[in-house]
Amino acid sequence: MRAVPLGAAFGLTSLALLGALLPAGATQAAEPAPDRGRCPRLATDLPWYGENREHLQEVIDEHGSCGNPHLRHGNRPVAAFDWDNTVSKNDITDLAIAWALKHDKILRPARWSDTSPWLTAKAERTLTEACGTEVPVGRPLPTSTDTDCTDEIFSIRSEATLMNGEKAFAGKWNSRRTLPQYAWVPQLFAGHTEAEVTAYARASRDEALAAPVGATQQVGTHTLHAYARYNPQMKDLIRVLKKAGFAVWIDSAGSAPVTKAWSGGVGLDDAHTLAIRNLLDRHGRITYTQEGCGGEPASKGAVMPYIEGKRCWLNERVFGVKGPDAWKKQAPHRRLVIGAGDADTDVTMVGDATGARLVLNRNKNEIMCRAYDNADGRWLINPMFLEPLPEKDGAYPCSTTGFTNPDGTLGPVRRTDGSIIPDQRDTVHG
């Protein structure tokens, strides 16, 4: 994949126009060209696919302090990253839930329907039967020994189904702003403080980092990855971006207290970590109500940093765009320069980037359709750094079912001009 060097497409035209506008005989004081050799550099001993490192370095040099010696703090270029399977290998939210289930940290709700407006009546009955009513409301469920309870909870989280295969959620939601099983995850920690949940996530992080690559664990009767790693290339990229004057953010569809337990490992603080955050009660304990965005009120998960929601959270919290406009694509000067993700969850955020759009290939339809189509030359595809997937079997269905509509139906993936992206072959893989 090739990225268009920033400024290359318009540089000569702009210089010619400037020359035409200057009075005859006028001269322009040229600033000395930056010494690229002194710019913050990406590590050369960490392998990237093709020329991805060189293209990223070019964008960093162009937009960072090296290419802009008068860069002021208020005008810092922005980079934003998904977390799960982008900055880290494997899903840290699943690891935190698994740890909580194994250590009896899920508190019994008064009614399971309190945890989600889309939980079906059958799902509520099943959870009530599986987890019992003997434990008082607000006390820990014995999930470390109660396999039936653990299985139903984890099945709903991972598959949005009950153990018998029936759907756990029903009703209407905007499928480009939320996903019920994702929104349900932070609800499982209701009744705890954020500090407690972060402590659980840190414990799961320590175990996962110590586990060998490829290790698995049992959660009830489910088999789940037991290990995780910070991707060294992404950690290095974040380091260089910060050194070059970028404001670097995490924009995740995970739980905020969980994501914050990990983000410090790549040098990012809590203030630069965006994720699902639940409101707290007067005692500082997590409630079932989650923050809203873009003029949408707090709710039990109607909006979250998911597909279009990742744009909203970034526009609102980073660029100061208020109200419904936060859901809209902004002018280039109010957008991120570098974005990175691995899934359709990230496609809008990554697609908004004006300089480089890095995608780790996990065979997800919409984001891979847009990346392979590469309409403006700014998409960069990299196999996953650890345990990359092999070539996808068959083409991505871009022309038919690659796009998820707000009502959940599937349709073709379209470019900004409305034309349909043709099906794409998977050519960048492990």
Image (cartoon, rainbow, N blue to C red):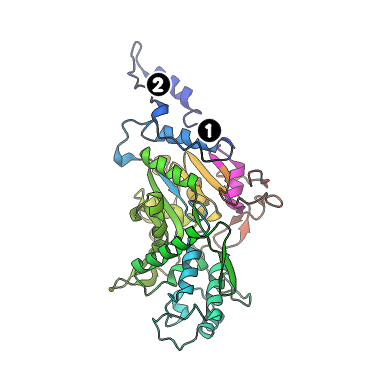
Q: Is residue 364 magenta?
A: yes
Residue 298 in sight from this viewpoint: no
Seen in the image, is 396 located left or right of residue 169? right
Seen in the image, is 197 located left or right of residue 4? left
Q: Secondary structure at mark 1?
A: loop
228 relative to 351, above or below: below
Q: Are marks 1 and 2 in contact (CB under 8 Å)?
A: no
Specify few, some or many for label 2: CA neighbours under 10 Å numbering under 14, 14-19, or 20 or more. few
Residue at left 49%, top 78%?
143
Q: Position of residue 386 (x, y in %)?
A: 56, 50
Residue holding disc 1: 4
Q: Position of residue 276 (x, y in %)?
A: 42, 62
Residue farthest toward the left in the current orientation of the protein:
282
Nearest the viewer among 103 and 192 is: 103
Specify few, some or many for label 1: CA neighbours under 10 Å numbering under 14, 14-19, or 20 or more. some
Residue at left 38%, top 19%?
21
Disc 1 residue type (three-letter): Val
Residue 86 in sight from this viewpoint: yes
Give the number of the mark in front: 1 or 2: 1
Q: Position of residue 42 (x, y in %)?
A: 46, 37
127 relative to 400, above or below: below
Disc 1 to disc 2, C-alpha distance: 22 Å
Q: Secondary structure at mark 2?
A: helix
Nearest the viewer among 253 and 235 is: 235
Seen in the image, is 257 located left or right of residue 400? left
Residue at left 31%, top 31%?
70
Disc 2 residue type (three-letter): Leu
Image quadrant where residue 274 sits: bottom left
Residue range highlighted in magenta: 361-380
Residue at left 45%, top 56%?
252
Q: Indicate which disc, 1 or 2, sits on the residue closer to the N terminus.
A: 1
Residue holding disc 2: 18
